[in-house]
Image (cartoon, rainbow, N blue to C red):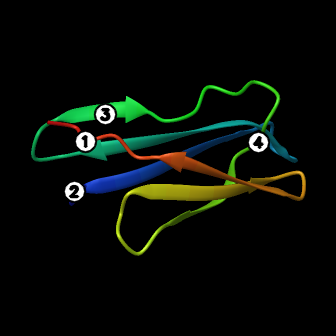
Amino acid sequence: MLPGLRIATLFDDGHSVIDSDLYIADLKLKKKIQLTNTPKLLEMRPSWSPDGQKISFDSDGAIYSAKVFDLR
């Protein structure tokens, strides 16, 4: 899969990050999928696997990995 655009959303209150979730979007297909919906985690520093099948991120010192869905 070759996504057109990869997005991680971060929300802040002007002083610190207070919420975040990861999305993948394809501009060509005009679709997006929310990868995470975790109110208690702040997904930070997302990084794609070399094969594009997973995205890893850290939150509070722990490392997580999410499988990326095909948008077609």
Q: Quadrant of the C terminus?
A: top left
Q: Residues within 10 Å of mark 2 (few under 14, many from 20)?
A: few
Q: Compare marks 1 and 2 and give the one earlier in the sequence.
A: 2
Read off the residue under disc 4: 42
Residue type (three-letter) at the residue carrying disc 3 = Lys
Q: Residue at x 31, y 33 (%)?
A: 32
Q: Closer to the observer: label 2 or label 3? A: 2
Who's the residue at 54% across and 46% down the image?
66
- Find the distance from the CA under tag 2 to the CA under tag 3: 14 Å
Label 4 vs label 2: CA separation? 26 Å
Q: Give, as a three-letter code, the residue at label 1.
A: Asp
| Residue on which the image places disc 2 | 1
Q: Nearer the viewer, residue 50 or 19?
A: 50
Say what amino acid the circle numbered 2 marks: Met
Residue 38: percent from the left, percent from the top?
70, 28
Specify the quadrant of the image occupied by residue 70.
top left
Q: Rounded to the nearest whole Å, what is the CA distance between mark 1 and mark 2?
A: 7 Å
Which badge, 2 or 3, is on the more N-terminal residue?
A: 2
Badge number at residue 70: 1
